[in-house]
Image (cartoon, helix red, strand yellow):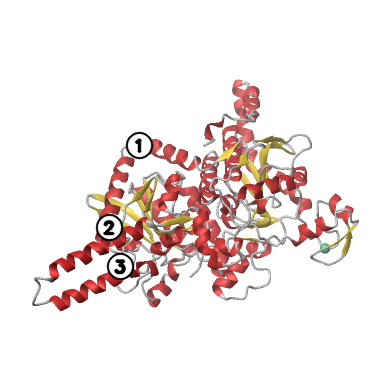
Amino acid sequence: MAYIPFFGKKMNSSIAVKKRDMPDGLWLKCPSCAEIVFKREIDSGGSVCPKCDHHFRMARKDRIDLLIEPGSFVEWDEHMTSVDLLKFTANGSYASKLEANMKKTGYKDAVSCGRGNIAHHEVVFGVMDFSFLGASMGSVVGEKITRMIERGTDAGLPVVLSCASGGARMYEGLTSLMQMAKTSAALARHAQAKLPYIPILTNPTTAGVMASFATLGDVIIAEPDALIGFAGPRVIKETTQQDLPDGFQKSEFLLEHGLIDMIVHRHEMKKVVVQLLDHFMNARYAENKSAAGNEGAAEDEASAIDVPARESSESDR
Amino acid sequence: MNGYALPFEKPVVELRNKLEELRKAGEGHEVDMVQEVERIQKKIRETQEKIYSNLTPWQQVQIARHPTRPYPKDYIDAISTDFTELHGDRLYADDRAIIGGIAQIDEQKVMFIATQKGRDTKSNLACNFGCPYPEGYRKALRLMKLAGKFGLPIVSLIDTPGAFPGMEGEERHVAEAIAVNLREMSVIPTPIVVVITGEGGSGGAIGIGVGDRLLIMEHAYYSVISPEGCAAILWKDRAYADKAAEALKITSRDLTQLGLVDEVIAEPLGGAHNEPEVAFDNLKTAILKNLSDLQSMNTDQLLQTRYEKIRAYGKFTE
Ligand SMILES: [Zn+2]
C-alpha cells in the first residue's frame, strides 16, 4: 500500500551543515565539484560555486537582494506567528521546535512577503526559507502567501514568489493541508484579474507546496539542479522498488518532461524576471496610460500601489 | 461483518458465532432457546457499544480501511440510479482510481467524482489500490468543468490512501494536476459537496476535495500525512503509527472540534460495513440536504461563500 509522502523536515541538508560547521572558515569544499573554494568568493557571487556553478542554498535576505531594488522592499505580516494548535508532541513539542527555529533564523516563520520593485516593475514578492522547519507550509506560510496574492490582486500587481519547501507542516495536521486550497484559491482570483504570477522553484521544492502554488505559475522558473517533485525519492523507491534514474526530479528532468518553462542561472534571474514582466505587463501599462490620459489618473496609479502594510485582522481565526 | 474481522472486533464475532451455533442446536425445540438468544443479542449490542464508544484514533483508521467497508462506488450504486460513467482525461489515460459520471439521486441529477478501491488482487491492481495517477485528477477536472457547464451539482466521494508516489506520477506531474484542481474547484460555478467516506489521504484526497461543504463519515479519517508516514519521519519507525494517528488529530470527532469539517455522517453501530444500508441512507440524506441548501444561493453568493470558507482555514497570532 502506498502512502503519500508529505515529508516533514528531514531533507538532506548537508550543504547547510557544512557551511555552519565552519562559520569562520575561509575555505569551503563545494559538494558538487569537490573543489576547495574561497568562501568569500561564493558569498559575493550570489552563493554560486565559481568553479562549477553549483547553486548553494541562499539566505532569505540575499534572495530579496537578488531581485528587489535596494531599499524598496516593504515587508508585510512579519510578526505573524504559528500556534501549536494540536499540542503536537513527538520527540519534543511543535511549540519548542517553533521556538528553536525562531531563535536559529531570527524570523517568526518560513516565509517573508512584501512589496518592492524589480527594476521598473512594482511587484509583491515572497521568499520561502528552507532553514526554518524545511520551509514547510502551516497556517502562517499559507496565510502570508494568501494575503500577499490578495493584495497583489487588489493593487493590480504581479506576484513573484521564490519557492522552497519540504511540504505541508504536519505538526499542524489537516489545517496545514488546507493551506494548499487557500493559496490556490487566491491564485484563481489573481489569474481572473489577468495579472502575472511567476514562481521560482529553488532547491528543494516538493510535496504540498508543489501540489499548490508552486506549479500554478503563468511561467514557472527553476534554478539549475534543484530537487523538484511531489513525492520524495526515498518514498518512491520504497513504494515501487524501482531504481530512480540519475537526475530524476531535478530541474533539467522537469524541463525535459514539460513542467517548467525554463531553468535560469541565479546570475541571470533578475534579467529574466524583468523581461517576463515587461512582456506580460506591457498591455496593462498601456491601458493605464490611456486611462491616465483620459482622466489624469496619476493619482489612481499611486493609490493602486498603496497597499496597506497591515490589514485588519479579520482573518485571524 | 462477513469474513474479515479486526482484532478489536473479535469479541463481537465470537458472540455472533455462538448465537449461530445456538440457533442451529435449537432447531426443533425452541422453547428454552428464546431467552438465551435474546441474552446473547443483548450482549452483542453491549459489547459493540463498549468497543465503539472507546475507539482509539488508530482503531478508527483501521475501520476506515476495513476491507469490507463500503467504497464510494457502493454508495453511488445504492443511492442513485442511471449512473453514466464517463472515461478518460483526453490527454493520456483513463485512471481507474478516480471514476466519475452523471447519475440521479431521487429527483436530483449530480456529477459524481469518486475514488475507487478494489476488493481482490485483480480489482486492486486495476485501480492501483486506490492511489490515483495524474490522469485521475485531470479526468476529475474535465468532468467537474462539464458539471459547471451544464449546471449539475458535484458530489465528490473520497476514500484513498493518497496519490500514487511513483516515477510515472512524477513524469506526468501529479503535483501540477492536484494544484490545478485546487485552483479550479474554488471557482467552478456549481455546488460541490465533498464527503470523506473512508481514508482521506492527504494531497490525493484534497485534489478532488475542495468545495462548498466538507462532510465526513463517522469512522473515516482525513490527514495531511498517513499515520505510518508520520511515524516513519518522527519516530523513525512505522510501528508508531498509533501514536502518530493520535497526535495528528484525524478522526471525525477531532476534525469537528478543530472546525475543519462541516458535518459528520453517522454510521451504524460497529461501522458502515456492519449495516451498509444504514450508512447508505445516512449519506444520501446528508447529500440531498446539503445540495438543497446550496442551491438556494445564486452563483455569485455560492462562489463568494466558498472562497470565504477556504480562506478561513488557519490559526496564528499576529
Ligand atoms: Zn563547485
* Amino acid type assigned to the residue bearing label 1 in the image: Asn
Q: Position of residue B211 (x, y in %)?
A: 42, 47
Q: Counting other residues with Cα less than 10 Å from the Cα at mark 2, is it few (<14), some (14-19), or many (20 or more)?
A: some
Q: Nearer the viewer, residue A128 or A170?
A: A170
- Report the residue at 56% width, 60% height from top: B230
Judging from the image, what secondary structure is the residue with disc 3 in?
A: helix
* Label at residue B12: 3
Q: Does B75 sit left or right of B184 as displayed?
A: left
Q: Position of residue B295 (x, y in %)?
A: 31, 41
* Amino acid type assigned to the residue bearing label 2 in the image: Phe
Q: Nearer the viewer, residue B4 or A302?
A: B4
Rendered image quadrant of residue A280: top right
Rendered image quadrant of residue A152: top right
Name the N-terminal-most of marks 1 and 2: 2
Please, is residue B148 above or below residue B28 in the view?
above
- Which mark is nearer the camera, 3 or 1? 3
Q: Nearer the viewer, residue A187 or A258?
A: A187
- Report the residue at 35% width, 58% height from top: B52
- The residue that mark 1 highlights is B298
Q: Position of residue A57 (x, y in %)?
A: 75, 55
Q: Is mark 2 within 8 Å of ligand 1?
A: no
Q: Does B159 sit left or right of A31 as displayed?
A: left
* Label at residue B280: 2
Rendered image quadrant of residue B136: bottom left
- Which mark is nearer the camera, 3 or 2? 3
Q: Nearer the viewer, residue B40 or A185?
A: B40
- Which mark is nearer the camera, 1 or 2? 2
Judging from the image, what secondary structure is the residue with disc 1 in?
A: loop
Q: What chain does badge 1 belong to?
A: B
Residue B61 in view here: yes
Residue B81 in view here: no
Q: Does A302 sit left or right of B106 as displayed?
A: right
